[in-house]
Amino acid sequence: MAERGHPIDPGVEIGHVHLKVADLDRALGFYCGVLGFELQQRLGDEAAFVSAGGYHHHIGLNTWYSKDAEPLPPRSTGLFHFAIRYPSRAALADALRRLSEAGIGLEGASDHGVSEALYLSDPDGNGIELYWDRPRERWPRDRQGTVEMVTEPLDLRGLLAELDR
């Protein structure tokens, strides 16, 4: 077991994810066409960089080692999923609407107490969590103040009702 050192700086964030994909156009159709990310740069059929809000890239997509490749089998090592955090419950509801309109099914939907999350895979089989965080003061805690995450079913109808408010 690794020895615990000093905690990492609390300002550290995960900046972007880079995914190997089999077909760049198909991946862009999903990330830009369905989820709504904006294309920032494309390098032919080899790579593309997409983001929200004009950032240089939140997601890199490339075919450098994966053009026309098959997805990894489910029982293999690698990335389980990456998460995209939405700024509000209404923004997550919009993501659910986009997925539904595109005919993309969910693999799961959970209320974790601290957050609400949608789980799915992209066209290359990469796992994705779409979620929003509740305000910290609403996170469930035990008597000692430790966060107590849960996994309960997410009310999808209630989530979509956010779009009518």
Image: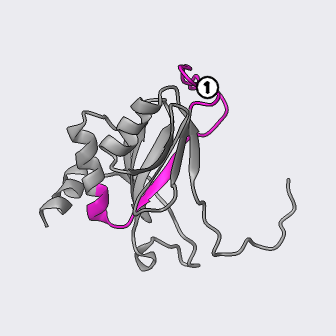
Element marked by disc 1: loop
Placement of 105 over or under 155, stated as above or below: above
Amino acid residing under circle 1: Arg
Instruction: Classify residue 80 as left or right of residue 83.
Output: right
**Residue at horizontal 59 percent and vertical 24 percent from the top:** 72
Residue 112, quarter of the rendered image: bottom left
Dominant secondary structure, magenta? loop
**Residue at horizontal 22 percent and vertical 48 percent from the top:** 97
- Residue 161: x and y in percent read 16, 58
Residue 105, quarter of the rendered image: top left
Magenta highlight on residue 150: no
**Residue at horizontal 29 percent and vertical 61 percent from the top:** 91
**Residue at horizontal 44 percent and vertical 59 percent from the top:** 85
Instruction: Classify residue 131 as left or right of residue 146.
Output: left
Q: Quick check: can you spot residue 22?
A: yes
Q: Which residues are magenta?
A: 63-92
Instruction: Classify residue 164 as left or right of residue 130.
Output: left
Q: Quadrant of the C terminus?
A: bottom left
Closest to the observer, 40 or 140 = 40
- Residue 35: x and y in percent read 34, 47
Query: How packed is label 1: few (under 14 Cα within 10 Å), some, or many (20 or more)?
Result: few
Placement of 29 over or under 93, stated as above or below: above
Placement of 50 over or under 27, stated as above or below: below
Q: Which residue is mark 1?
A: 75
Instruction: Classify residue 30 as left or right of residue 15.
Output: left
Q: Quick check: can you spot residue 155?
A: no
- Residue 93: x and y in percent read 26, 56
Closest to the observer, 120 or 3 = 120
Exactly how many numbered labels are in the figure? 1
Closest to the observer, 30 or 1 = 30
Magenta highlight on residue 68: yes
